[in-house]
Image: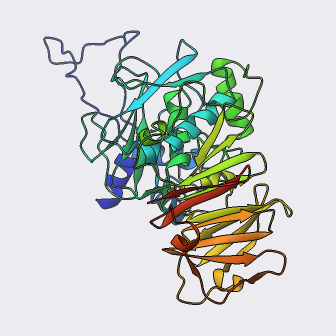
Amino acid sequence: MQVLLCLVCAFGLFGQYHPAPLPLEDDGSVHPTRPAQNDLRRSRPSFSSKLKDMQNFFGLNRTGTLNPDTLAVMRTPRCGVSDVEDYSHRRGNRWKKSIITYGYTSDLPVNTVDALFASALDAWAKASPLTFQRSYSHQADIMVEFVGNEHGDSFPFDGPDGTLAHAFGPGEGIGGDVHFDEAEAWTAGFKGFNLYVVAAHEFGHALGLKHSQNPNSVMYPTYKNRKRHNLLSSEDIMNINTLYGKTNHVSQSITVKFGSYFPVSFKDTCNPDLTFDAVTTVGEAIFFFRDKYLWIKHNNQNDIKEGPISNFMPKIDCQIDAAYWVPQRSTAYLFNGTIFWTVKGSQVKGRPKNISSLGFPSWVQQIDAAVHIHKTVHTLFFTQHQYWRYNEHNKTMNDSSPRNITDDFPEINGPISAAIYKDGRYQSDYN
């Protein structure tokens, strides 16, 4: 019975079937009927035939029996949109417009999901002439919600694992809406289920695409922890182009055209509660880190690149406590707890190292902020109410013990969360 329920929920092997009574003659014999053009009645497919359809879709041997390979696919977390009824088409309906609005319920933490959804939609925008605008009303074309088991659309979720999300194709009302199972362990990295990857898949459905049999396609129905760069396969791009035409974007960079996707507090630069986990200059750009997200502002551009840190640096899937840039090496250093990464461009070099390799004693468990002074070739590391001076040329600490921040920076009376050195001045953000 458990396996049967899995089949019904995950693959829709059995549709709703309510046979109507057959018309009878006066003598009790069946009256011959001719099917109407729109008659939806049909013979009930056999269990074996539907298994064969599913096995064919996933490239399995068409045995019609519950063999180990078939059961393994059934147990894989997957999208809740069923393709069992139609394997011959990879696309469905389409929106009759090129500017599509999206939104989600106001009780969601905006600073947690905004960047992920914007990045997932941007993947489709780059491959098509579509433009996505964030809507703060309940009239958006694509409404995104995190919901529980029973949530009013007759397609309940099943708790952790199993069905991760489902979406409805373009149309009025519930058409285009995307629902995520709130019971899942959603993450921005490689643990749990990556919200960016699943959202890109479900947004594909919301735009009119169906499941693909190609495991490299983002529209493949079972979950895979995919690469973040170039998420869409050539098949995905071809299918979205078939629906909407080819892209007419001149630039392929991430561009915020309709207002910033920063957390609400970030828009208010006078907000006294505004803090960052880390800030650093990198060449002519400034990198802002908060939680697991990164925003990049170039000096001579109005546009801001944004997204999960792992989108830009796939090997890093965590919050960044401190960061600094050494222009002489064109190298950035990113810190989390007692480890740090060396980054050149977007390439993370080698494995993370322990901060003890820089000369920190074992009792230092976290760097609050770091800033490099290129004129003196020194880096200042801030820990609580103290700071350390590190000689980048000799690769040694200047002193065996730290100095008090207030002794040298009397205007700063609290721990520092982020700092940069720009145009000959220190600029800090402290709690």
Q: Nearer the viewer, residue 31 or 76?
A: 76
Q: Nearer the viewer, residue 244 or 133?
A: 133
Q: Nearer the viewer, residue 22 or 352?
A: 352
State the residue at coordinates (47%, 48%).
51
State whether residue 90 appears in this view: yes
Left or right side of 298 for 402: left
Left or right side of 66 for 29: left
State whether residue 60 appears in this view: no
Give residue 84's position: percent from left, percent from top: 48, 38
Above or below, 298 against 287 in this view is above
Q: How is the image coloured?
A: rainbow
Q: Quadrant of the C terminus?
A: bottom left
Above or below, 400 against 350 in this view is below
Q: Quadrant of the N terminus?
A: bottom left
Give residue 64's position: percent from left, percent from top: 50, 52
State the residue at coordinates (71%, 70%).
379
Q: Quadrant of residue 146?
A: top left
Pick out the residue farthest to the left. Answer: 26
Q: Quadrant of residue 103?
A: top left
Give residue 105's position: percent from left, percent from top: 33, 35
Q: How many marks?
A: 0
Left or right side of 370 for 343: right
Q: Nearer the viewer, residue 97 or 111?
A: 111
Give residue 200's position: percent from left, percent from top: 55, 40
